[in-house]
Image (tube, helix red, strand yellow):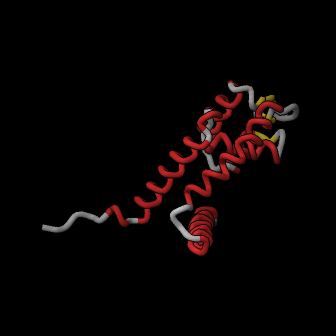
Amino acid sequence: MSKSFDFKHAPGYLIRRAHQLSIAIFMDETVEFEVTSIQFAILNVLIDTPGIDQVTLATRVVLDAATSGAVIFRLEAKGWVRRNLDPVDHRRKRIWITPEGEIAAQKMKRDVSRVQKRLLSPLDQVEQTQFLTLINKLVAGHQKIHTD
């Protein structure tokens, strides 16, 4: 009889667990805002690129169009973003962060910094640098594979 697969030491399992921990810590630190990490990312893209079209925004935060539409709808309901049809191409929607959304995103930055510190806290400073270098290399390597 063969042994079962040791999934608890498999990279995919460990990445999924790290993601679960990241989400849990994010939700804990940002509870007062009732926001997700994806919503926070979208708000920050909109701060940097107001009026970006929805498809480009989805690409920047690595979401499919349907999911990004639902997330943007929730941000609109909070009054943090607004959407308008592109005046030139009516098939496209342009998105702007509202003043209220920008204030909320700015207030969240301190909390999100705490998320990053808590997430990496089991590692010493050298390990944190190594981990970030390696995870960036892993992600970049797979992005290159999927874009070639």
Q: Determine whether 48 is above or below 78 in the image.
A: below
Residue placed farthest to the right in the image? 87
Q: Position of residue 90 (x, y in %)?
A: 80, 30
Instruction: Choose between 101 and 59: the one closer to the eye.
Output: 101
Picture residue at 45% right of the left edge, 55% below the top:
16
**Quarter of the image that includes the C terminus:** bottom right
The image quadrant of residue 83 is: top right
Picture residue at 62% right of the left edge, 71% below the top:
129
Q: Position of residue 72 (x, y in %)?
A: 68, 33
Q: Position of residue 67 (x, y in %)?
A: 59, 38
**Quarter of the image that includes the N terminus:** bottom left
Residue placed farthest to the left in the image? 1
Query: Can you see residue 132?
Result: yes
Query: Disc count in the image?
Result: 0
Q: Position of residue 24 (x, y in %)?
A: 51, 45
Q: Determine whether 143 is above or below 28 in the image.
A: below
